[in-house]
Amino acid sequence: MADLVDEIRGRLGIEEVVSQYVQLKRAGRNLKGLCPFHGEKTPSFVVSPEKQICHCFGCNKGGDIFGFIKEVEGISFVEAIEVLADKAGLKFDRTKFKKQIPKSEKDEYFTAHEIACDFFEEQLHKTDDGKKVLDYLYKRGLEDATIREFRIGFAPDKFDALYPLLLKKASKDSLLKSGLISAKKIGSDEVYDKFRQRLMFPIFDSFGKVCGFGGRALSSDQVPKYLNSSDSPIYNKSGLLYGLSHAKKHIKDEDKIVIVEGYFDVILPYQAGVKNIVAVCGTALSNNHVKIIKRLTSNVVTSFDTDDAGFEATKRAYFLFQKEGILVKTVNGLTGKDPADFVKEKVGDFKSVVNESPDFVTFFTEKLMKSYDLKTLDGRKKILVDLLPCYKQMTPVIMDFFVKKLADRLGIEDKYLYGELDQVKLPDGHPANISNSSGESEVFSRKMSIAELIVSLMLEYSNLFKISKDLLLGENDFDDDMKNVYNALADQYNASRDAALVWDFSEGFLSKLCDKITVMRLYAEEKYKDFSDTALQSELEKLVDRLRKDRRIKALKEAQSRIADMEKNGDKDKLKELIEQQQRLLKSN
Ligand SMILES: [Zn+2]
């Protein structure tokens, strides 16, 4: 395994791996971006190509390529190796790792879904009933290559077509839980296929593994029109976006995402070249979706249905993204059609329509202006009631922009609009108020101690170690890990005296603290990157000064509390001695 890990490290850089999830901008030797692990508006997530690590100075999460993938995808180390081996174009032999991967429940579900997906594809392409469905797909505008790429299939009108195949590979229990089969009655041992006489869209997780299905009715008397997998250990609809595994690369490349409502609305534009497109499956847009998207891009365009429900979904998207500092745009100009039909009927160029989308607030304003009469008091009131909640959580600069624009339209002064805005309260259940923290681990932020800062400086700028000696810094100035690191550095310093000092972290005590040391060095590098040698030296002097001051204050406090104890107990000699000690401490201050 170590060989494979090294080989992967040799092929994939941290920058390349992280940039699949985070938009990075160069900042000196390092790159910076918004942390994918906690919500933030100014970037504190740093990637160091030189040190091959990433680290968030807000929540302290990060690591090398394996640590990063583990954390961001919520998977095990071995699974992270598998993912990265794949990215690096290396073969990962699962059988070699049998001992490391206990055959998990998840594997059984994935296997069952893969079997089901193969089966549905075969039914579509190789049976007479399937051929009719294939004709329907052609009529909807799909081409063969696209049908294969999205692995679209057909579930025949039978109760026992699929489950006998599945039972060969998975237990009845897990198949019931996976939602691929249903029990005849609650607790019944008799089962049947859940998806029958349906067009089957496999739903892929972000790695492209089939983890659920959406089944579309094929005859008009079938309900529901869309039957989706229920949530299972591998399928969580509030965290999945249909088409994401296909779209991911394109979203990054174009730095933009288009969110639509249905399977055909993803597939037909994709076929026509708009590949940065995804849909939510059988649920409303959630905070989880927003988080996944935010890691990829901050340019979001929605293109939902043009009916009332579609508009409500659009508004919800606006509020959810606004909380994350993203101003959503809304497709306008599909002439009442959904994206699939618009593309199929070649009404216009979908890509241009996407690129010309107005921001949601402008879109909404125009919509309201058309519905209400600006000249009547009632009309003006209705416009304000509908529109102002959208302004509520804007940043001041953006708010100013929109307030001015609206005041202009209404022919009133800004201050009256601000007055109205103050009155607006968003109700509890409002999308803008849905908590962001659900299911997220508590973000903690720990500041470096002075001792750690000093050691960080010496780690990153080895020349400072000599100066620290001149400042009479010694092991007693440190505790615990820092004392050990300091001693290890002192050993190396003593061994190499006059030679140029390059710390070696590969052996002994330092190797055990390698991760911590790399993060400390990155911290020092970030914090002091613009410092000259003299500035670094005086920073070290200041820090050492503070370290000693802090220590004196601590000793003084301890002496004072002991004096208080002695006064209670009446030990006069001891008391005198302590007071003298206290005087000395005060004088040395
Ligand atoms: Zn963070």
Image (cartoon, rainbow, N blue to C red):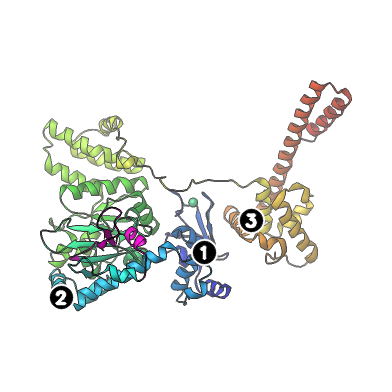
Asked if disc 3 is less than 8 Å from ligand 1, the answer is no
Q: Label 3: few (<14), some or many (≥20) within 10 Å? A: few
Question: Magenta region: which residues?
Answer: 169-198
Marks 2,1: beta carbons within 8 A: no
Find disc 2 in the rendering and name its residue. Answer: 131
**Three-letter residue code for mark 2:** Lys
> Is 286 included in the stretch rendered in magenta?
no
Of pointers 1 and 3, the one earlier in the residue sequence: 1
Which residue is most to the right?
A: 573
**In the image, is 542 to the left or to the right of 344?**
right
Q: Is residue 272 visible?
A: no
**In the image, is 423 to the left or to the right of 47?**
left
**In the image, is 551 to the left or to the right of 372?**
right
Q: CA distance from mark 2 to mark 1?
A: 44 Å
Q: CA distance from mark 1 to mark 3?
A: 40 Å
Marks 1,3: beta carbons within 8 A: no
Is residue 48 shown above or below 328?
below
Which residue corresponds to the image point at 59% horizontal and 54% vertical from the top-left? 523
Marks 3,2: beta carbons within 8 A: no
Report the mark closest to the observer, 1 or 3.
1
**Three-letter residue code for mark 1:** Phe
Instruction: Count every numbered label the image shows and give the total.
Output: 3
Find disc 3 in the rendering and name its residue. Answer: 532
Find disc 1 in the rendering and name its residue. Answer: 77
Task: List x then y, in percent, for residue 278.
Answer: 28, 61
Q: Nearer the viewer, residue 318 or 65?
A: 65
